[in-house]
Amino acid sequence: MLSLLRTSLRTRTASAPTWARSLATVAPKSLNPFNPDLEASLHLKSGESFVGRSFGSPKSRFGEAVFSTSITSYTESMTDPSYRSQFLVFTTPLVGNYGVPGNLDPANHEPNGPPVMLESNGVQCAGVIVADVAERYSHYQAVESLHEWCDRHGVPGITGVDTRAITTLLRTNGSTLAQIAVGDGHQQRPHDADYWDPAVENLVDQVSTREVYTLNPDGDVKIALLDFGAKANILRSLTRRGASVTVFPWNYDFNKVRDQFDGLFLSNGPGDPKHCMDAAVTLRKTIDEWDKPIFGICMGHQIIGLAAGLDAYRMRFGNRGHNQPVLALASSGNIKAGRVYVTSQNHQYALELQDPFPRGYQPFFLNANDASVEGVMSTPESGKRVWGVQFHPESAGGPLDTIHMFSDFVAACRSTAKNAAGVALPEGGMAKASIKLTDFEAGL
C-alpha cells in the first residue's frame, strides 16, 4: 500500500517512530488560506490553455490530464493510488461541498482493516481541476476544506475553468500531458519538451509497499495480496469477510511462500502494466503450478492477462467514473452470464480482445460502451480457478453491483482451506456465497 500504511503497521515491531516520521512530510494544517485573487492556468500539450483561479498548494506542476465522470466521492478518487501523477478533471460542476474527513483518525477506521478511512494516507493525484470549488463545506465527519487538504499535501488545484470543454478535448484527442501554472507568468505556455510523461516511469513501484505486513492475522482463511497500489477498501473488503490478508510488494516472488496461503489477490495500480512484466512472468509460474484461487482487479486483471498471453494497449482516454456498464459473458459465483452490471473504473490501459483467446482462458466481461475487455477467467476444462476484472467491485463510492465477487472469492479460498484436495465448485470455479446486506456497505 502506501507509506503511512506500511510504516504504521511496522511500528508494532520496530523501535523507531517511523509512523511519526512519515507524517512529518505533511503539514498538520493548511498554511495558505484560500486566495480567490490568485490566478492559474491549465496548459495542455495539445495546444489549449484555460485560465482560472488557484486553490490548494500554490505551486506549478506537470502531469497527465484525465477526466472522471464520478458525481461524488472526490476524496476516495483523489486518494486512489491509480491516479498517481495525473491531473484529475471532475466533470461534476461543484466539488468540495462536503469537505474532507479525518482520514487518519482511529475513530474512522474499521477493526482489523488498514489505518486509513479513505483509499490511502494522502492525495495521490498530481492536481485537481474543477469548474467550481466549494469554499465552504458541510458534513458531520469533515475536518477541513478541499483547499486546505490539497494545500497540506502539496497538490495544486484550479477552479473557474470550463471542465465541459476540457473533457470534450480529452475525449476527442485523448488524455494529454499538461501543466498547472500558478501565479506570476502563469499564462506563459511551456515548451513541448518541458512536459513530463509519467507513463515512462514505473508508477507501481512508487506506490507499492516495501515491506510485508499482515492485517487481521487471526482470520480463518489466509490470502496473499500483491500490492500494485492497492486501494484500502480492497483490504477492508477482504478482512471484513474474515480473511487474514498478507500484503507483499508488487515484485515479490510469491512462489516462495505460496503453500502458506489459501488464495492470491492482485490489486489495482497506476500506469502501464508492461512495466510489471516481471510480476506477470512470476504469476505465469504460479498459475501453471498452483491450483488455488487467484483474483485480480484493475492492474491485477491486466497482469493476469499478460501472464495468460494477452497483450495490453493504451486507450485513447480510458474509463474513469462510477457508471461504466459491463456485460457478463460467463457465469461464476453470483455473476450471471447475460446480465449487465454498472461498475466503477479507473484505468488508461486495457487487454486486447483476441480470437482465439489463449488456451485455458475465456472472456469474462466486455464493456457495453466500447467493447473493451472487462474481465478474463480460466475455463472449467483448465482445472484452474483464476478470475480478473478491470473494474472495482469494492468501490467505496459505489456502485456495488458486483461487490459479492469478494464474498465469492473468499468462499472459494475458504473451501480450499477446509479441503486441501479441493471441492466441487459451481460453473466457472468461483464459489457462490450467500449475499448479506452488509456486503453492500460502501467504505466503512
Image (spheres, rainbow, N blue to C red):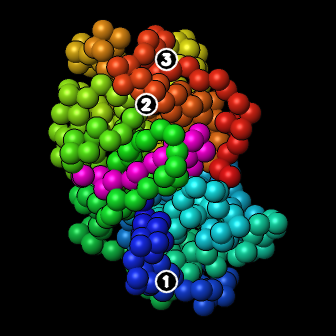
Q: How far apart are the two marked residues, 3 and 1, measured between alpha carbons? A: 45 Å
Q: Is residue 301 left or right of residue 433?
A: left
At mark 1, the secondary structure is helix
Mark 2 or mark 1, earlier in chain: 1
Residue at the location (64% across, 56% down)?
110
Residue 382 vs residue 415, the one in the foreground = 415
Which of the labelled discs sits on residue 417, or is there none? Answer: 2
At mark 3, the secondary structure is loop
Mark 3 or mark 1, earlier in chain: 1
Residue 240 within the segment the image draws in magenta: yes
Crowding near the residue tagged with mark 3, few <14, some 14–19, many ≥20 C-alpha atoms within 10 Å = many
At mark 2, the secondary structure is helix
Which of the labelled discs sits on residue 332, or is there none? Answer: 3
User: In the rendered structure, which segment of residues is drawn in magenta?
Assistant: 234-252
What x and y, as percent, mark residue 245?
Answer: 45, 48
Amino acid type indicated by mark 1:
Ala
